Image (cartoon, rainbow, N blue to C red):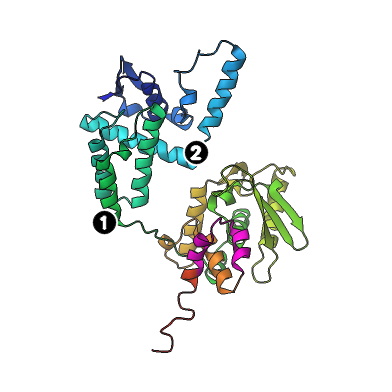
Amino acid sequence: MVSSPDHSFSTDIVAAQAGPLRRAGHKTTLESSALWPGEAAKNAAPSLLAEEHYRGSFHSEALEKIWEQAGVFAAGRHAPATQRAYRSDIRLFFCWAQAHGCTVLPAAPEHVGLWLTEQAQKGLRWSSISRRQAAISWLHQQAGYPSPSTHPLVKNIMAGMVRKLGSAVHPKHPLQKSDLLKILAQIPETPRGIRDRAMLVTGFAGALRRSELMALRWQDCSWHHQGVILRIRRAKGDQLGAGSDIALLRGKTLCPVTMLKKWQDISLACHEGQEDLPIFCKIEQNGRLIPKSLHPYSFVRILKTYAAQAGFDPALFAGHSLRSGLLTEASLSGADVFALMELSRHKSVKTLARYIRRAKLFDQHPAQNIF
């Protein structure tokens, strides 16, 4: 049983986060078989503003409509990826609580500590465990309860856990130019292959994150004799959507501009010149282009498939490999740090320095004249 004493509106919060709940007074039973069905999960608004607790509080229909819009804004406080992750984490905690007969709201600190410890025993990395703790804290804050994460017991468990597990990030292999050329050689000269070739080279040349690459639309391209300027509407470091521009230069051995233009000719011809379309759209088995963007995970799968065909271990590569590959190549060629930051849109030199330091580990090594 999952109970929520005292605060009647908190069960509505739970309903918005965990799917349909059966309410009986202040007691709420989780129907695990109906967890997160279809659109109910997708559209769950992570905000108190969207709860029934507030509906009917206004004396005018106009204010009610404005309040609905306020709920939409509040639901967008977190990035979509964060919202999806929180929903998943809260669902897992609900299932665990139901299986062990624990109260979810408010959750006892010892129960939260037990659950997080179990996650560590299952082999989860520190970053995932820390995010799950944050999801539980967020749920409690939204429901008006103190976060169990502030309790000394949970703090001590997490502090000991990070010392035991470590918080190191395990970067994937950077896909450098020589490796990229081998992969490109495996791609056939078909519409799908032309799309994939343009996608990989654009991601590399622009040091783009996979989400940024998949979000590009043809109207974001501005063509020039020197290359093409891409408008990045939103990025990891730009959650407010101020946007930024990056330039892709024409190349001799590897030209992203030529490859992108070749794919544009095919894409726009299939869609009668319409430019308000995703650049890297889906293609059906029969070759028909669909005006919907590829999912970032599909991009990773495509990259790994071609990497395997080129003789590489696909497990070495991930969506970040193109971005880290370009930054590694550029740092080895002596590119200015601030010019690199302009391209990569890193806010901190410290973050960018990780790429540079790793790329130059053997340069000016203090032991180079000893061995």
Q: Quadrant of residue 15?
A: top left
Whether residue 37 is in magenta: the answer is no
Name the dominant secondary structure of the magenta segment.
Answer: helix
* Residue 78 badge: 2
Q: Is the N terminus in the top left, top right, bottom left or bottom right quadrant?
A: top left
Q: Residues within 10 Å of mark 1 (few under 14, many from 20)?
A: few
> Is residue 327 placed above or below 137 in the rendered structure?
below
Give the magenta part as a residue range. 336-356
Q: Position of residue 188 (x, y in %)?
A: 58, 61
> Alpha carbon of mark 2 to alpha carbon of mark 1: how far?
30 Å
Q: Secondary structure at mark 1?
A: helix
Which amino acid, by three-letter code, is at mark 1?
Lys
Q: Secondary structure at mark 2?
A: loop
Q: Which mark is residue 117?
A: none
Using residue 56 as the reference point, say whether residue 13 is left or right of it. Answer: left
Dot 2 amino acid type: His
The residue nearer to you, when weighing 156 against 217, is: 156
Sooner in the amino-acid sequence: mark 2 or mark 1? 2
Q: How many marks?
A: 2
Identified at 39% across, 60% down, the residue is: 170
Spot occupied by residue 353 in the image (x, y as percentages of width and height): 50, 65
Residue 299 vs 183, above or below: the answer is: above
> Which residue is depicted at the point 47% across and 58% down?
304
Within the magenta stretch, is there residue 348? yes
Give the class, few, some or many, for how many residues have Cα within 10 Å of label 2's Cα (few <14, many ≥20): few
Please give the residue where the numbered disc 1 appears in the rendered image.
164
Q: Between 308 and 317, which is closer to the camera in this rendering?
A: 317
Q: Quadrant location of residue 314? A: bottom left
Residue 226, percent from left and from top: 75, 63
Residue contact between numbered discs 2 and 1, judged by CB atoms under 8 Å = no
